[in-house]
Amino acid sequence: MSSQTVLKLNTGATIPAVGLGTWDSSDEEAYNSVIAALKTGYRHIDTAAMYRNEVPVGKAINESGVPRSEIFVTTKLWSTQHRNPEAALNASLERMGLDYVDLYLMHWPVALKTDAIKDGNFLTVPETFDGKRSVDLDDWDFVKTWELMQKLVQSGKVKAIGVSNFSINNLKDILKPELKFIVPAVNQIEIHPQLPQEELIEFCHSKGIVVEAYCPLGSSKSSLLSDPEISKIAEKYQAEPAQVLINWGIARGYCVLPKSSNPKRIESNFKTFTLSPEDTQAISAFHEKYGVHRYVDPNWGEFKAFV
């Protein structure tokens, strides 16, 4: 298995199994990390409007010297723009200086109200007077958003559409046969040994939906990279713990999106090898010993995203 391993989308296109995540990167970090990743050989870059770094990500893509046609680019629709995904997409393309993206994801299956936004900045998290997220549940839901996103494929500005942070029940809502909607090409979700997501992964695969893992190394608050069991497996392959976690994901059949702004770490994360079924299973059972933990769990008030 090589770093150029690809998975096939239900559109017929291919997507590289290892991509660069850019969440929580400053403008300088985002630009430099994308340049370093593309120089290393990455051909899959993941960003989002809400990351507020589409400008430097796009600048790096355009200045990298790598042909645009060789790079798989993903960005995402933020929750304040569910009622007008076309305008949101156009704004993302303008910020990135691109004519199209390969994948456009609904970032979360919940819309936010925009009443309190007075400055036109939709890349924010509107809150109610008591500090809770101002969720738009009055006459809107993500099914309506997905219906609007169908038109984006026809525009030629996106090659595929998908979702992020969708549960099985949320997926079932947009997969109802009578709706005749496009089946999402991708569901991007949090996955790591403390949150293996086996049931959700199996459901996605059964529907022809490619799974992408964000936070594949846990988070800065997790102890995965220093865990003795994972370190022992890493020694067996003459690899680093991060490489083991990335390849655990590839062995399970989905894309992995490690994030780093360190050029050496970016290069290291791109190394792939084949984990044995026994080691893959041992890591998959990690949560049984240490418990299940979700690191990304925003409070959406009445809307329960992961139910």
Image (cartoon, grey):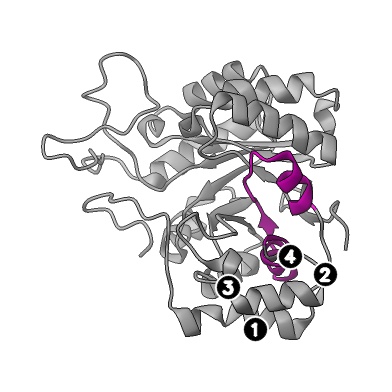
Position above or below: 31 against 38: above
171 or 68, nearer to the observer: 68
Q: What number is the disc on residue 282?
A: 1
Give the position of the N terminus as an image quadrant.
bottom right
Question: Residue flagged by tag 1: what amino acid is it?
Answer: Ala
Q: Which residues are magenta?
A: 242-270
Residue 61, percent from left and from top: 74, 25
Residue 120, numbered label: none
Dot 2 falls on a residue whose secondary structure is loop
Q: Is residue 294 above or below residue 113?
A: below
- Kindly report which numbered mark, 3 or 4, lies closer to the viewer in this rendering: 3
Q: Position of residue 185 (x, y in %)?
A: 64, 50
Q: Residue at x 82, y 60 (%)?
A: 272
Left or right of residue 268: residue 140: left
Residue placed under numbered mark 2 in the picture: 238
**Amino acid type, mark 2:** Gln
**Sequence-earlier tag: 3 or 4:** 3
Sequence-wise, which precedes: disc 2 or disc 4?
Answer: 2
- Decide: few, some or many residues near mark 4? Use Cα within 10 Å; few <14, some 14-19, many ≥20: many
**Can you identify the residue that label 4 sits on?**
247
Disc 1 to disc 3, how far (Cα)? Answer: 13 Å
The Cα–Cα distance between marks 2 and 3, rounded to whole angstroms, is 16 Å
Examine the rendered structure and indicate whether residue 189 appears above or below residue 264.
below
